[in-house]
Each structure stands twice: as C-alpha cells, then as structure tokens.
Amino acid sequence: MKRMLAVFAHPDDEAFGPGGMLANYGQREDVEIHLLTATRGEAGMWDEESRLKVKGERLKIKNKEEIKIHHIRVEELKESAKVLGIKKVEFLDYVDGTLCNAIYHELAGKITKKMEEFNPDVIVTHDRLGWSGHLDHCAVSMITTYAFLHSTIGKKLYYYCITKEYRDPTDDNYFIYFPEGYDKRDVTTRIEYTPYWDRRIEAMQKHQSQKHDVDSIVKWLKTKPKIDTFILQRYRGITAKFPESDLFEGIISNSD
C-alpha cells in the first residue's frame, strides 16, 4: 500500500486546490490518503443564501444558535474527503488566520508526529506562495517543509502550484496580493484527472458555506485543462526523472 499525506491550512483547500489529483489517487486500491488540516476555517465567510440546514444533533450541539461557521466547515470537509477517497481527516486545532511564527515549531512537531505515525511515501502541501497568497497557506508550506527536512520520513515532498497560464486574472482582487503563478518550466509533475472531473466538482460542492468561491472556481476550472500541477520540492532515497506523471514515480512503497 502506497501512502500519501496531504497537509493544508483550511477546510476546502483539499478540493479547491489539488482536488483532481486527490480524486485520482483516492480511487486507487493501492493508495491510502490521510489529510492534516491546520485550522477549522473559523475566519471563513459564511454564504448566507446557502446556509446549510444542519441539525444540532448531528453536531452534538443542542442550541442551533451556537452553531458557528467552523462547525459547518468541519462537516463539509469530512463530506468532501469521502467523495475524494481520503481515508482519514485530522485537525491540528489552530485558529484560521493565526498561523504565525509564534507557533511554527509547535505545528511542525504535530506534523512530524503524524509523519512518524503514518509513515507516508509522499507528502503534498501548499507551495511557498500559498497558491492564492493566503498567509496561512504560506506558513503551512514552510512548516511542512521544515518537518520533512528534519525527519527521515517520506521520500517526496510536493508543492501544489498553479502556472501563469492557469491563473485566473479576476483573482487579483481576491486577497491583497494574488501571486502571478509559476512558469511552465518550474513544474515537475502533472496529474491528469479528466476521468475524475465530476468527483472533484462534487467534492467542491460539499463546501456550500463557501458557495461564492465554489461557483467562481468551478466556472474557471471548466475553461482549463483537467491537470493539477506540482513542484517536487524535495526528495530522498530515489532517482527522480522529469517530467513526472505520477507522484509515486520511483518509489517502492514503505509497506512493500
């Protein structure tokens, strides 16, 4: 069994980011995927028009007035993970928007502990630019890289990234700065996911509290090739040959 650990900052990063890749590998019987999410999405904007009708009993909350956005986003992530084929989802319990240098080593320790428990072959995280410029994404990228470099666990560390050609110009006003994307020559690995397009969209649509973003990203994705792009940032114990079309290329599974 091959193992992949995905490390992201927020609920919906798994679907809005490399959802096609995850749907691809999540359907394979020889691959097990676990997901670490640093926060529960507490700072997310709640789309009032599409507010989910969640029963308090399901969330173990008797008073519906006490249901907060992060309660909903946790449930949405669990549903998205099922669609994508992610075997296990874990939260590291930091607060959305607070991933600063004060907690870097603590968070790195939690990621390292998960790596030691799960023993993944491949680790996937945000690229250094956070793909959308979100500072939580940037922090998780750097902290996961630190954990990889200060451990002997894992053969490959991948950054999910978008190229300049793939970038949506309308995102310029999304955050204070939306990175310009990478040159094609920077990309080492491309995962084609056309057979899993419907599954990716289904996973995205589980995040209905973020409906505005879902609708915008789906509209954008429909115009693009069904390919997720990655940078193989670090690797060890293998010979890498580029370009790649498989994140497990060159790896003999830890459990083989």
Image (cartoon, rainbow, N blue to C red):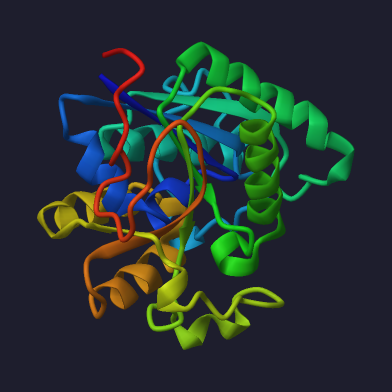
Hey, which residue is sitting farthest right in the picture?
A: 102
Regarding residue 186, the answer to whether it shows in the image is yes
Judge by depth and name the residue closer to the eye, 8 or 174: 8
- Name which residue lies at 46% across and 18% down: 119
Q: Is residue 27 above or below residue 180?
A: above
Judge by depth and name the residue closer to the eye, 155 or 209: 155
Hey, which residue is sitting farthest left in the picture?
A: 195
In this rendering, the count of numbered labels is: 0
Regarding residue 83, the answer to whether it shows in the image is no
Q: Position of residue 134 (x, y in %)?
A: 65, 61
Q: Position of residue 171 (x, y in %)?
A: 53, 80
Q: Position of residue 190 (x, y in %)?
A: 30, 60
Q: Position of residue 187 (x, y in %)?
A: 42, 66
Please state if 157 lies on the left or on the right of 166 as rendered.
Answer: right
Q: Is residue 185 above or below residue 172?
A: above
Hey, which residue is sitting farthest front in the picture?
A: 239
Quarter of the image that includes the N terminus:
top left
Q: Is residue 180 above or below residue 102?
A: below
Quarter of the image that includes the C terminus:
top left
Q: Quadrant of residue 99?
A: top right
- Name which residue lies at 83% across and 35% down: 103
Q: Quadrant of residue 216?
A: bottom left
Please state if 228 lies on the left or on the right of 225 as rendered.
Answer: right
Q: Is residue 170 above or below residue 28?
A: below
- Name which residue lies at 31% across and 61% down: 243
